[in-house]
Amino acid sequence: MTRVDFYLLAEQSNTSRLDFACQLAETIWRRGHQLYIHVANEQQALELNEKLWSFKPEAFVPHGLLNAHPPSPVEIGWQDDPGNHHDVLLNLDLKVPSHFSRFQRVAEIIDGDEAVKAPKRADWKFYKERGYPVHTHDMRSR
C-alpha cells in the first residue's frame, strides 16, 4: 500500500515550498529512488525545472520534463499519466493526482500559506479515510 508523508514547513511562500521540494528531490534521488514530481501546470513544471538546476551550486539532480528524451531518474510533469513511474511521487499540486496509488510512496509539502494548508488538510483527510498510512514530518523546528 502507498505510504504518504506530509512535510510541514514554517514559511509562507511558494519559494520555500519549491526550495524544500528541490532538497527533498535531491535526497530521494541520492537514496537511489526514481522520482516523479507532479505539479499543477506546465508553467510550474518549467519553473521547478530551472530551480533544480540552481537551488544549490554543489548539487546535481538529474532531471527533466516528463516524456523528454532521454528519460531522467527525476521527472517533472503535470499530465494525468506519469509515464513509467511507480516509485516515489512528490506532489506539488494542490490536489491529489488520480494516479497516486500506483506509487510506493507519496510526499506532500505544506507551508504556512493558508492557500496551501486548506487543500492539503483535505488531502490528508482523503488519504486517511481510505486507509493509507500517513506520516507527518515537522520541519518547522529544524
Image (cartoon, grey):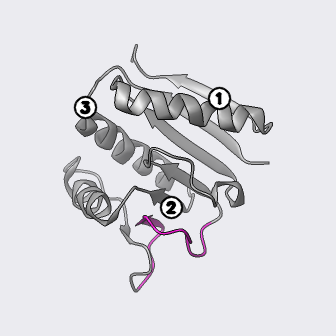
Marks 2/3: CA–CA distance: 23 Å
Residue 108: x and y, percent? 51, 40
Disc 1 marks a residue whose amino acid type is: His
Name the residue at 65% across, 39% down: 4
Name the residue at 48% across, 34% down: 119
Residue 82 is a magenta residue: yes
Marks 3/1: CA–CA distance: 23 Å
The C terminus sits in image quarter: top left
Q: Residues within 10 Å of mark 3 (few under 14, many from 20)?
A: few
The residue identified by callout 2 is 36
The residue identified by callout 1 is 135
Name the residue at 29% across, 23% down: 11
The residue identified by callout 3 is 13
Seen in the picture, residue 114 relative to 62 is either above or below; the reply is above
Regarding mark 3 in the picture, which secondary structure is present there?
A: loop
Regarding mark 1 in the picture, which secondary structure is present there?
A: strand
Q: Are marks 1 and 2 in contact (CB under 8 Å)?
A: no
Regarding mark 2 in the picture, which secondary structure is present there?
A: strand
The earlier-in-sequence mark between 3 and 1 is 3
Q: Residues within 10 Å of mark 2 (few under 14, many from 20)?
A: many
Marks 1/2: CA–CA distance: 19 Å
- Residue nearer the viewer, 134 or 43: 43
Disc 3 marks a residue whose amino acid type is: Ser
Residue 131: x and y, percent? 80, 36
